[in-house]
Image (cartoon, grey):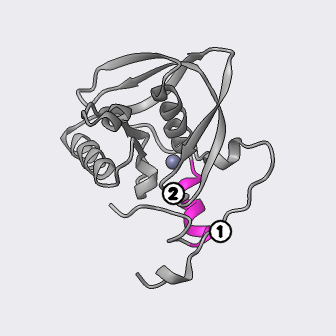
C-alpha cells in the first residue's frame, strides 16, 4: 500500500486519487475484509489514527480509524460506506494533520457532534454517535477523504500546497 501524498505525486496523479469520490462497496466479502485489515495494519504502521482507502490509491468507500491508539490501546474501527446521519450545530477549530499532506498542521472547522452510520467488517450496520471527542473530528476528516475533500478545502481562504518533492523523484 503506497501512500498518496502531495510530496510523492504530481498534482495530476494526486488529484486523480484523492479528489475523486470513492465508490460504495457493494458486497463485503472475504476479499474486502482483507483489504480492510490491510488498511488497519497500514494505519498502525504509519502511526496514524485514521486512514481512508483512497489515501493508498483504492477507490472504495472504506476508512479505518483508531483515536484510542493514542493512549496505547488498540481499538480499530472499520467503516465501509460511512454516511452522516446528522450533526449538531456547534462547530470548533480542530487541530489536524494529514498523511497525504505531510508537514502541514492546521486548525480545521469541524462539527462537535456527529452521528454516522456504516457497515462494519462483519457486514452489519452500525451507528456511532460521538459527542465532543477526537473521534468526531477523525470521522469527519476520513469521510471528507472518501468524498475527495482535503482538510485544506475546509479553510476559508485558499491554501497553497506543493504537489511534488524533487527529492523523492524516481523513488
Ligand atoms: Zn488526511
Please tell me which residue is depicted at 48% across the width and 29% down the height of the picture: 134
Query: Which of the numbered marks, if any, corresponds to residue 100?
Result: 2
Q: Is residue 105 magenta?
A: no
- Residue at point 58% right, 47% down? 148
Q: Is residue 55 visible?
A: yes
Kindly state the secondary structure of the residue where label 2 is placed.
Answer: loop
The answer to whether the residue bearing label 2 lies less than 8 angstroms from the nearest atom of ligand 1 is yes
Label 1 or label 2, whichever comes before in sequence order: 2
Locate the N terminus and report the quarter of the image it occupies: bottom left
Kindly give the residue lying farthest to the front in the view shown: 71
The local crowd at label 1, few if under 14, some if 14 to 19, many if 20 or more residues have their Cα within 10 Å, is: few
Percent coordinates x, y for residue 57 in the rendering: 43, 58
Taking the spot 67% from the left edge, 63% from the top edge, the residue there is 161
Q: Residue at x 61, y 48 (%)?
A: 150
Judging from the image, what secondary structure is the residue with disc 1 in? loop
Q: Position of residue 108 (x, y in %)?
A: 65, 39
Q: Quadrant of residue 113?
A: top right
Who is closer to the viewer here, 43 or 58? 43
Above or below — where is 61 with respect to 170? above
Residue 162 disc label: 1
Where is residue 117? Give x, y as percent: 44, 20
Amino acid at each position: 500500500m503506497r501512500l498518496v501524498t502531495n510530496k510523492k505525486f504530481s498534482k495530476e496523479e494526486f488529484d486523480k486519487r484523492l479528489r475523486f469520490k470513492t465508490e460504495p462497496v457493494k458486497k463485503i466479502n472475504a476479499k474486502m475484509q482483507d483489504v480492510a485489515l490491510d488498511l488497519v495494519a497500514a494505519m498502525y504502521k504509519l502511526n496514524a489514527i485514521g486512514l481512508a482507502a483512497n489515501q493508498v490509491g483504492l477507490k472504495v468507500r472504506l476508512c479505518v480509524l483508531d483515536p484510542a491508539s493514542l493512549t496505547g490501546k488498540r481499538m480499530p474501527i472499520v467503516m465501509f460506506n460511512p454516511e452522516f446521519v446528522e450533526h449538531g450545530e456547534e462547530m470548533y477549530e480542530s487541530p489536524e494533520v494529514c498523511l497525504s499532506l505531510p508537514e502541514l498542521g492546521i486548525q480545521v472547522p469541524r462539527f462537535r457532534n456527529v452521528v454516522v452510520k456504516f457497515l462494519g467488517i462483519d457486514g452489519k450496520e452500525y451507528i456511532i454517535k460521538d459527542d465532543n471527542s477526537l473521534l468526531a473530528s477523525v470521522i469527519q476528516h476520513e469521510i471528507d477523504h472518501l468524498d475527495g475533500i482535503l482538510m485544506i478545502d475546509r479553510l476559508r481562504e485558499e491554501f497553497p500546497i506543493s504537489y511534488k518533492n524533487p527529492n523523492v523523484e524516481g523513488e
